[in-house]
Image (cartoon, coloured by chain):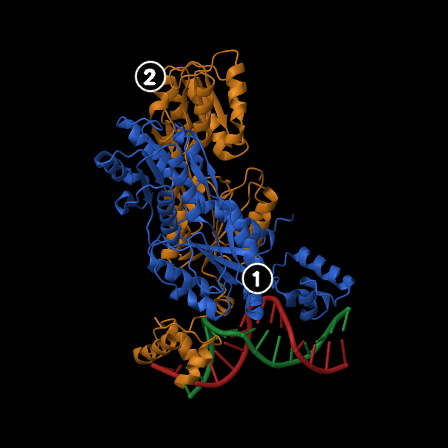
Chain colours: A orange, B blue, C red, D green
Amino acid sequence: MQSCTVNMKKITIYDLAKSLNISSATVSRSLNNHPSISSKTKKKVLAKAEEVGYRTNKFASNLSKQKSNTIGVIVPKLNSYFVSSVLSGIEKIANDNGYNLIISQSLESKDKEILNAKTLYDSGVDALLASIAYETDNYNHFMRYIDQKIPLLFFDRIFDIPNCPIIAIDNESAAYEATKHLIDQGCKNIVHVGGDFKRNVYIDRKNGYEKALKAHKHVFYESNCLEHNLKPENVEKVIEFVKNAKKKVDGIFISGDTLAAHCVKALQNIGYKIPKDIKIVGFNNDPISTVVNPTLSTIEYPGYKMGVLAGQSIINHLKGNINIESANSIILKHKLIIRESTKN
Amino acid sequence: MQSCTVNMKKITIYDLAKSLNISSATVSRSLNNHPSISSKTKKKVLAKAEEVGYRTNKFASNLSKQKSNTIGVIVPKLNSYFVSSVLSGIEKIANDNGYNLIISQSLESKDKEILNAKTLYDSGVDALLASIAYETDNYNHFMRYIDQKIPLLFFDRIFDIPNCPIIAIDNESAAYEATKHLIDQGCKNIVHVGGDFKRNVYIDRKNGYEKALKAHKHVFYESNCLEHNLKPENVEKVIEFVKNAKKKVDGIFISGDTLAAHCVKALQNIGYKIPKDIKIVGFNNDPISTVVNPTLSTIEYPGYKMGVLAGQSIINHLKGNINIESANSIILKHKLIIRESTKN
DNA sequence: GTGAAAGCGCTAACAG
DNA sequence: CTGTTAGCGCTTTCAC
């Protein structure tokens, strides 16, 4: 590796062409491994390029080719265990396939999401992967992608747009299993704490909770469903609810491990025994769930895998391996993990 | 918001120019809010642009302007609480200032980091923010940025390159404080578990640990320093060490909360009382540290803030507000947070 | 197998 | 205040 200490001007294919006494077209073709170039010239060009440290100018190339080798990603927020697992998977696949990732976060704001979608469009991303914000209630801002036939895939927090692939888990049946597990363990009055019930993820889970109750001859009370942003700061709301409940709460299904873990601690602080008095199931299988005492029963939520599949799926689209019209929905398997917080 | 269902061709400034009977230059200037255009024409152009759904082509613009409004980021790995906090901060600032972020992860591999650095360079990032991989042992692959005067900033895992700004915390004194705290609490034989001691972050902490011991008349043993990748899977190594230690271990300073939390649990499982038998201090103030029982004393490590500052610093450079030659190092304040795991 | 030349869409120096 | 024009660096069609 030569360390180039001279502050050299950026060199172009013309420079290469000149110093080799060939045309810039030949240089370009050689660099792109075009079949109709003799391997001799190719070698010559490559060697020279290496020698002088030539690096292609992607703007020019993209402008000319009208594609960017870049995939845009919009997530609700970056600093979440689940999201960063997904991103890690996406990045792995993208990178392995020579794609760059432009990542932006909506911070759960619809306006920011709209802006992000615009910016990424302007940036000429070849495809967009999105997981939508709490606030977002329509998909107008994504129509541009669809109109321009830019592959668009939603993961986790999804919209059901015709012909638009999605990757998610079956939140409803996951919630059903979680709730059923609590029922099986003998819980008589199970409370559900979920995120914004406008979002597919959370309304699906609520529905699963409801179905499980009804399927097992429990009464479903709307009032037993707490809508909550799932941040640990708000653990008090849950605690208050439990304390003030007319009928003793003996089971809680919470749509997030971090909050669940904090609930465990907070409930213990005011004298409840977990799992004896109250059994708790979380969601996500965050690392936190194995550390809290008692360890937390939860739903395994395959973030990294979701990212990998999202990446592969969109890249397949881009490479034309899959007919983009045949929108495929991928539903990943979840898994109920039973730990101490629901033991009998 | 009009939903354009027709699959329209992408429109350019020439289209706008033609339909308004003005020159493309005027359109361009209007779009960029150039001072020397009458607000009347500006309005006209903007209106038309909005009407027909014009979006600027960044490749052309970037090619012409030789800048991309894009900042590259290389992190060791995406799925870490600390990293995602930093990224969240960077993204916030970048987005507020109209910059895109291209994010890539080295997965702690030197080769991948080199490749990422190349790719981002090719992608024409205006600046690069990097936190280096475990494996990386030289900065040749960053020289290109320096040669081309592309602002380069290291955060957290840093290299000391002349004139290259860094943002980090004072790991040595943080470790010193953590160790001193254990000493103050009466620990007589304190073990240190750190990451790869080649990395500044971890060697600095080790040095801080050593200095604290020596400053307080404790003997420093190299053999009491465990080099470790800090993944919870390897908690056994720590446990084995503690069990087999000739002199009873009564304090552990661990360079990461996740591992520390798992150590707490694992040690409890084999009969140790925390903090009575062994006191433990972690690092990072991850959410996990407040959930483990006993809660974990740790060093607060301001990830989000680090990201914000990294973003601001690099954007200031880019905007020319700060002389790029005056490389400024920002050392963020850390804070020892005392919780139950070190109580007496 | 290689070269010439016309773009890709936008910017900016220069002219008016 | 606005228009003309020459690039930015690469790709690609059409010739040879």
Q: Say whether residue B65 is visible.
A: yes
Is residue A308 shown left or right of residue B309?
left
Q: Secondary structure at mark 2?
A: loop
| Quadrant in which residue B99 is drawn | bottom right
What residue is shown at x 58% (from left), y 65% (from top)? B323
Look at label 1 and name its amino acid: His
Give the residue at mark 1: B317
Is residue A187 shown left or right of residue A64?
left
Residue B305, x across and y down, in percent: 53, 46
Residue A93, x across and y down, in percent: 37, 52
Label 2 marks which chain's residue?
A
Is residue A196 shown left or right of residue A1?
right
What residue is shown at x 21% (from left), y 36% (from top)? B244
Figure quadrant of the C terminus of chain B: top left
How would you rate the neighbour count of disc 2 (Cα within 10 Å): few for under 14, some for 14-19, many for 20 or more? few
Look at label 2 and name its amino acid: Asn
Give the residue at mark 2: A344
